Image: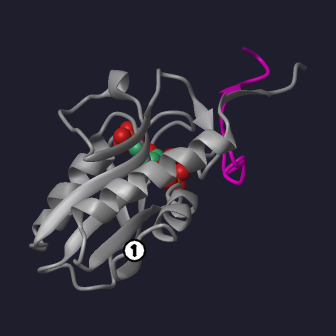
């Protein structure tokens, strides 16, 4: 049986340069204000860790865990909150961190859910965006890379929980492709 294959899409050096650019923009936009940075597990953990180390304002970090049902390589759109934010959201400058926005269903749901908690400001920052896959009208405020509709892994993104640790972004080709 043929083996799965990984094709480099965005090298580590380009990912890190982009995270530096995003951090510079966020530092400028939120200068002097405290940020509540909330990562959506599991995929956001690496991007969040890289990004927050480049932020210069006071930062509080929290996480949410969500689960969407469906096949291994696509999102079904049903979002279940497995872990909510622990920090108080009301009045905060809330920056949601994602590894990827695909159909937009997860982030649309989460941003509506969190907006009901009345943050002073709510913005979304994603490392990757796949605008061609959108099922709902949703645009992140900060986007690292807009990419075509490939199944990608690395920098927190997985296939069957593997490959999250890869420092670059790779297109995943299954062995039977
Ligand atoms: C990914 C990603 C987003 C969601 C985006 O999570 O981290 O949360 O899918 O897809 P959507 O725009 O189509 O809703 P995934 O369900 O793969 O879980 P993970 O973060 O644990 O890898």
- Total number of numbered discs in the rendering: 1
Q: Say whether residue 144 is left or right of residue 141.
A: right
Residue 50 location in percent, x, y?
A: 55, 62
Q: Mainly helix, strand or loop, the magenta region?
A: loop
At 39% across and 74% down in the image, what residue appears?
56
Q: Nearer the viewer, residue 132 or 26?
A: 26
Q: Helix, strand or loop at disc 1?
A: loop
Q: Residue at x 36, y 69 (%)?
A: 38
- Dot 1 alpha-carbon crowd within 10 angstroms: few under 14, some 14 to 19, many 20 or more: some
Estimate the x, y position of residue 97 in percent, counting from the top left: 39, 58
Residue 164 counted in the magenta span: yes
- 40 vs 113, left or right, is right
Q: Nearer the viewer, residue 8 or 136?
A: 8
- The percent coordinates of residue 85 (x first, y second) are 32, 77
Q: Quadrant of residue 117?
A: bottom left
Q: Residue furthest top?
A: 177
**Image point 37% across, 79% down: which residue?**
59
The image quadrant that residue 134 belongs to is top left
In this view, 85 is above or below 173: below
The residue depicted at 33 percent of the width and 64 percent of the height is: 27
Task: State the image coordinates of residue 127 (x, y, percent, origin top left).
Answer: 46, 46
Q: In this figure, which residue is indicated by the disc labeled 1?
A: 56
Residue 76 visible? The answer is no
Task: Find the magenta span and give its range.
Answer: 160-177
Q: How is the image coloured?
A: one colour
Quadrant of the image occupied by residue 46: bottom right
Queried on whether the Cβ of the residue with tag 1 lies below 8 angstroms from ligand 1, the answer reads: no
Question: Residue 36, can we see it?
Answer: yes
Q: Which corner quadrant holds the N terminus?
A: top right
């Amino acid at each position: 049986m043929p083996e799965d294959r990984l094709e480099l899409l965005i090298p580590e050096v380009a990912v890190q340069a982009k995270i530096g650019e995003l951090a510079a923009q966020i530092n400028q936009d939120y200068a002097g204000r405290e940020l509540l940075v909330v990562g959506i597990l599991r995929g956001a953990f690496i991007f969040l860790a890289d990004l927050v180390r480049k932020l210069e304002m006071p930062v509080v970090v929290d996480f949410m865990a969500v689960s969407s049902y469906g096949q291994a390589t696509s999102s079904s759109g049903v979002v279940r909150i497995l872990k909510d934010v622990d920090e108080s959201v009301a009045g905060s400058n809330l920056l949601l961190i994602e590894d990827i926005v695909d159909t937009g269903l997860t982030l649309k749901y989460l941003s509506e859910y969190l907006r009901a908690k009345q943050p002073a400001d709510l913005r979304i920052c994603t490392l990757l965006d796949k605008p061609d896959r959108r099922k709902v009208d949703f645009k992140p405020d900060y986007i690292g890379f807009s990419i075509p509709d490939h199944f990608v892994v690395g920098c927190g993104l997985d296939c069957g929980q593997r490959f999250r640790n890869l420092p670059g972004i790779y297109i995943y080709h299954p062995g039977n492709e």
